[in-house]
Image (cartoon, rainbow, N blue to C red):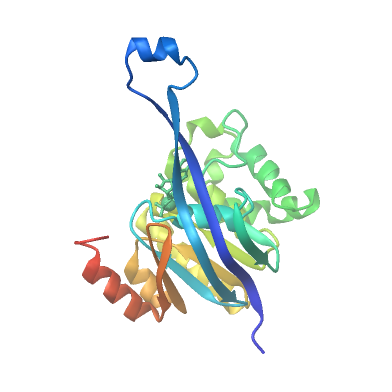
Amino acid sequence: MTVFSIDVSDVWKSFKLPHQRQDTFKERFLHPFHHVEVEQLHALKGVSFSIEQGEFFGIIGPNGSGKSTLLKLLAGIYVPERGDMTVIGRLSPFVELGVGFNEELSARDNVRVNGALLGLTMRQIEERYDEIVAFAGLERFMDQKLKNFSSGMKVRLAYSVSIRVEFEILLLDEVLAVGDQEFQEKCFETLETIRSQGKTIVFVSHDVDAMEKQCDRVMRLYRGEIVEIGPPDEVIERYMATTHSMG
Ligand SMILES: Nc1ncnc2c1ncn2[C@@H]1O[C@H](COP(=O)(O)OP(=O)(O)O)[C@@H](O)[C@H]1O
Ligand SMILES: [Mg+2]
């Protein structure tokens, strides 16, 4: 029997973009409230797919194709305007750097706040603290305020927390790309461990080599729609063949 972790059915999401209309002074005088037009930008247009429990599921597509919007919908950061989404299991969302971080607090306190936000008890946080810091390689810097950290250091810390909370589904947006090569390789090792524990991983990346090696299936998005879902090598090959002409 197939057990689903995520089921998305006909999901739509759009954003409203206000535009100042370039009209004449006279028109603006006659119709003072008419000069802002709102453009409806459809970021996702009727997306449907399912991810099985334990699957390593990759998502590719050019910039602006809707990958991050989809992950934020899954994480509950956005609400779909149409359609249904079912997520079975606890999520660890690693979708946007800075969510849950406070620049004015020390790195140490940020680990506590972040761990608590992601559902750890104070005791669990204390038990896992050394491991979190060691994996991030930041032992010497934990009493510094987070605002003194580089973006690479922040990514290492945030990732290290997010893989040590209690979860069944890990959502990963491209944020990992900010880290250096060595850290990225360490991350891929952790992903293998997470996968061997039967957990589900949803992975957005431009690193097609990593995707081809790691993913069970890959979904390709283009302009808010699913182009195809299938075996990584096939989907990536077709994506690379079109990427220069259409993206
Ligand atoms: N918060 C937002 N407000 C307005 N438009 C947005 C917002 N987030 C995303 N968009 C737009 O939605 C589309 C999809 O964006 P996104 O999901 O970030 O794509 P990707 O992650 O694939 O690059 C883009 O056209 C983007 O400009
Ligand atoms: Mg994105």
In the rendering, at what x and y percent does residue 23 appear? 33, 19
Would you identify the image quadrant in which residue 35 lies?
top left
Q: Nearer the viewer, residue 235 or 196?
A: 235
Name the residue furthest bottom: 1
Q: Kindly identify the residue that appears in the image at 62 percent across and 70 percent down.
A: 6
Q: Kindly identify the residue that appears in the image at 37 percent across and 75 percent down.
A: 212
Q: Nearer the viewer, residue 204 or 119?
A: 204
In the rendering, at what x and y percent does residue 142 appear? 58, 39
Q: Kindly identify the residue that appears in the image at 47 percent across and 14 percent down.
A: 32
Decide: is 33 above or below 148: above
Q: Nearer the viewer, residue 133 or 180?
A: 180
Decide: is 105 above or below 151: above
Q: Nearer the viewer, residue 130 or 2?
A: 2
Report if residue 96 is visible in the image: no
In the rendering, at what x and y percent does residue 185 appear? 41, 64
Q: Is residue 46 left or right of residue 87?
A: left
Report if residue 129 is visible in the image: yes
In the rendering, at what x and y percent does residue 171 appear? 56, 60
* Numbered label tally: 0
Tell me the quarter of the image containing the N terminus: bottom right
Q: Kindly identify the residue that appears in the image at 56 percent across and 61 percent down.
A: 11
Would you identify the image quadrant in which residue 176 lies?
bottom left
Q: Is residue 200 left or right of residue 241?
A: right
Tell me the quarter of the image containing the C terminus: bottom left
Decide: is 113 above or below 145: below
